Image: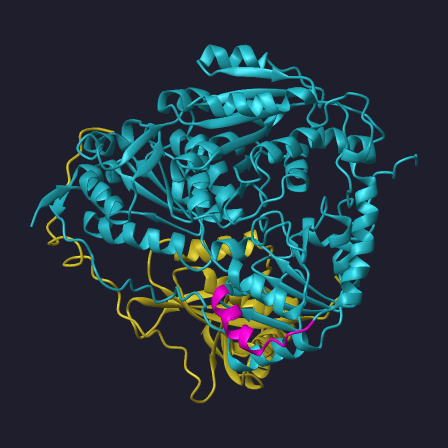
Chain colours: A cyan, B yellow
């Protein structure tokens, strides 16, 4: 039996959790662990980021792309507080990450020592759980528990704060095999028979049903079960932003995205439905609009792994706290095979109306529009890339114009809406899925929040393609100013650096696109380079994302793009 | 919010570990749940503490709080006690001005009608102790008010379900020694 240092125990435990890459930044209080890494570098690769927020987003991107736990590591004080935005992002979107932070030695805790912050206190509201390890004997067990909590139930971020003297201390290392005993942690699994019967009763008698599929389908590995439910019951499927990929968007039953910038047909179907079957989603305000008028004719079934989500925002007739895949497997044998041709043709009419309004059908007078850029990216990547977006107009345009076929291929900050997420998360995703084509689709605003990671991408020679959709505005905020603040464009026009020159300064090959006929060339250029590339798409400055449900308005009270020929 | 509000009592068994009270309090603050009272105390199991939380909220709030408490890893079990037949007690110590015969007589007379007793009395003040259901404590306080309350402390409500409904923690705490290490870990500090 080996006597190891705390630092070595940390790394031994990471190995046993299957960790092969971690994202971090060294500093005084985590230095013993960085020193121990030299002995593990062949098994756990450490990616040096340029800002700890990037480390958390990379771990998050890795987790979202793979379904495995991503790991970020940082020092005490400012290192740890820089992680917070990334941790909160992972929390809101239920992404499993484990963050390890150094802490000042136990004897110095509470003394306002150099680089001391109460990190467990700071991260308490934005983690699923966190730990301050005060006994080296608890270290291995704590790390094992942390990974277990991060990846099971409703996944989420877990932080482990480890004082420097614990890292430097020694003890006999016995890996805690066997069952993890957490008396207060029992994620629900199956539904009881009564609830299944009640749900089936509603499903089998619905005339105008709609399935609402969210992130839980993707994380719970329930895409196949979802499809079976939809096809057997003849129920159209509306997706949340994070649910994109849960069902192929070219499937005839797929209504694509719902919500504030969702498809009009999706929103109208929800408002007219007589049954909503909500699966692994949480009725966020961005998908419900005004709760008082939300889906007024519909009975509701809500299946989610988190019991606290049931009846939180929307009162439901049947609420089932359970693993969505398990519960769907319980439901499926009782689902009657049926079709709803009238309901679907009703929805088809709405979809055709939307098609007529589609910007891609309008003559845009040679201007380059973000919708064209994203749709061409979709076309030239065969709709099969992993796209990682930032937050804002380009994010919603991606959701509308890049239909996804499979789970884990759209990674985006939905809940927290974290600008700066896209590029570092794309780096993390590429580490998790090295054989897939990864595109960071970012705006000029968000990209500038974390573009320092260009150096990380170069140092790692990571093959991430960056599409900067540059409209010289904070576009989504400008859109709100246009609609709701009488076009007072304050603090939204934005001067940016010459992104091509900037990329070149980092050693990143880059090109600029100003016309649509360069689209194919730009994708081929990005693909021809085995390493990071940047393409700046100079798009029309004052675009508007349609449709839009104003915040708090009824879900079907959408601001629409005029039809061709209308004004 | 025009919904009906009512007092609801939630009992939680929690791991007796540092920071658990903070986790519970933080969750209430973060979710904007209004806490009326919170008591924490030991149980017959040394590694388990018991919290009784009274909230004043809309119907259904108790269940939401219950679900959110369940989400906390250190919370072992939760029950919405006010949904069940239960016994609840709030303990108060009330210091009343008794600097004349009239007030002393009045205090003595009032206490006879309550499960209350005078535990300290002098020429200036008396301390009255009552352990009863919250509404009875409130009633006593109302009666003592005109005489002159000068100081008061209340513990907040503790509650227990009646009969054989039992909230019990079925677990033994993890003993780290032997789980990972020999219990003889050594520590070194090379400066902050």
Q: Is residue B99 visible?
A: no
Which one is nearer the viewer's eye here, A204 or A90? A204
Q: How many marks?
A: 0
Is A332 in the magenta? yes
* Left/right of residue A75 with respect to residue A62 in the rendered view: left
- Name the spot of residue A39 as percent of width and height, x first: 17, 33
Which quarter of the figure is the C terminus of chain A placed in? Answer: top right
* Left/right of residue B16 with respect to residue B1 in the rendered view: left
Residue occupying the point 70% across, 32% down: A371
- Name the spot of residue B182 as percent of width and height, x first: 10, 54
Q: Quadrant of residue A48?
A: top left
- Name the spot of residue A309 as percent of width and height, x first: 57, 61
- Name the spot of residue A65 as percent of width and height, x first: 45, 43
Q: Quadrant of residue B147?
A: bottom right
Per the rendered image, the range of residues in magenta is A325-338
Is A148 in the magenta? no
Q: Is residue A508 visible?
A: yes
* Left/right of residue A170 with respect to residue B35 in the rendered view: left
Above or below, A460 against B138 in this view is above
């Amino acid at each position: 039996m080996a006597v190891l240092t705390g630092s070595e125990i940390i790394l031994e435990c990471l190995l046993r959790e299957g960790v092969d890459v971690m994202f971090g930044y060294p500093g005084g209080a985590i230095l013993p662990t960085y020193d121990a890494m030299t002995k593990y570098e062949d098994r756990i690769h450490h990616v040096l980021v340029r800002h700890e927020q990037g480390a958390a987003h990379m771990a998050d991107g890795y987790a979202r792309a793979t379904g495995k736990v991503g790991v970020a590591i940082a020092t005490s004080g400012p290192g740890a507080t820089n992680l917070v935005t990334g941790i909160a992002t992972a929390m809101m979107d239920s992404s499993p990450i484990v963050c390890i932070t150094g802490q000042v030695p136990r004897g110095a805790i509470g003394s306002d020592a150099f680089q001391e912050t109460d990190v467990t206190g700071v991260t308490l509201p934005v983690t699923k759980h966190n730990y301050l390890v005060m006994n080296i004997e608890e270290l291995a067990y704590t790390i094992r528990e942390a990974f277990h909590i991060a990846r099971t139930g409703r996944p989420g971020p877990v932080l482990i704060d480890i004082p420097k003297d614990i890292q430097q201390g020694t003890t006999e290392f016995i890996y805690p095999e066997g069952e993890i005993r957490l008396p207060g942690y029992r994620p629900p699994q199956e539904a009881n028979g009564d609830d299944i019967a009640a749900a089936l009763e509603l499903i089998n008698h619905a005339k105008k049903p709609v399935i609402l599929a969210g992130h839980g389908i993707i994380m719970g590995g329930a895409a196949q079960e979802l499809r079976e439910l939809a096809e057997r019951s003849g129920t159209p499927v509306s997706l949340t932003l994070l649910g994109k990929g849960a069902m192929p968007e070219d499937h005839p039953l797929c209504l694509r995205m719902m919500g504030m910038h969702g498809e009009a047909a999706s929103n109208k179907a929800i408002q007219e439905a007589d049954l909503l079957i909500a699966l692994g989603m949480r009725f966020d305000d961005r998908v419900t609009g005004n709760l008082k008028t939300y889906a007024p004719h519909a009975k509701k079934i809500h299946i989610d792994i988190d019991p606290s989500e049931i009846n939180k925002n929307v009162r439901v007739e049947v609420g089932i706290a359970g693993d969505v895949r398990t519960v769907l497997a319980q439901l499926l044998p009782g689902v009657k095979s049926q079709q709803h041709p009238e309901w679907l043709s009703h929805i088809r009419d709405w979809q055709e109306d939307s098609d007529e309004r589609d910007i891609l059908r309008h003559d845009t007078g040679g201007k380059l529009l973000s919708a064209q850029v994203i749709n061409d990216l979709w076309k030239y990547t065969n709709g099969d890339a992993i796209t990682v977006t930032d937050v804002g107009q380009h994010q919603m345009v991606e959701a509308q114009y890049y239909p996804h076929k499979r789970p884990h291929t759209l990674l985006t900050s939905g809940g927290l809406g974290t600008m700066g997420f896209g590029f570092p998360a794309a780096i993390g995703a590429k580490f998790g899925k090295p054989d897939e084509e990864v595109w960071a689709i970012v705006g000029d605003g968000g990209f500038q929040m974390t573009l320092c990671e260009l150096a990380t991408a170069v140092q790692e020679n990571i093959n991430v393609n960056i599409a900067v959709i540059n409209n010289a505005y904070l576009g989504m905020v400008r859109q709100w100013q246009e609609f709701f603040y009488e076009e007072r464009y304050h603090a939204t026009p934005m001067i940016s650096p010459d992104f091509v020159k900037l990329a070149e300064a980092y050693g990143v090959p880059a090109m600029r696109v100003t016309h649509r006929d360069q689209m194919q060339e730009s994708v081929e250029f990005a693909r021809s380079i085995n390493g990071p590339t940047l393409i700046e798409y100079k798009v029309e400055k004052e675009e508007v994302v349609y449709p839009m449900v104003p915040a708090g308005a009824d879900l079907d009270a959408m601001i629409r793009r005029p039809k061709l020929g209308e004004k | 919010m025009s919904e009906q509000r009512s007092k609801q009592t939630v009992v939680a068994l929690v791991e007796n570990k540092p920071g658990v009270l903070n986790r519970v309090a933080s969750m209430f603050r973060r979710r904007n749940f209004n806490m009326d009272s919170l008591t924490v105390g030991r149980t017959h199991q040394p590694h388990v503490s018991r919290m009784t939380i009274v909230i004043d909220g809309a119907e259904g709030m108790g269940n939401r709080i219950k679900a959110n408490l369940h989400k906390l890893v250190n919370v072992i079990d939760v029950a919405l006690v006010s949904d069940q037949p239960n016994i609840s007690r709030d303990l108060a110590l009330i210091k009343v001005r008794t600097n004349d015969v009239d007030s002393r007589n009045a205090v003595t007379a009032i206490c006879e009608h309550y499960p209350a007793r005078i535990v300290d009395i002098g020429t200036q003040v008396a301390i009255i102790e009552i352990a009863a259901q919250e509404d009875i404590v409130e009633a006593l306080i109302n009666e003592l008010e005109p005489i002159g309350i000068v100081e008061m402390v209340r513990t907040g409500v503790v509650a227990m379900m009646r009969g054989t409904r039992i909230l019990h923690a079925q677990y033994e705490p993890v003993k780290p020694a032997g789980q990972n290490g020999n219990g003889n870990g050594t520590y070194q500090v090379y400066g902050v």
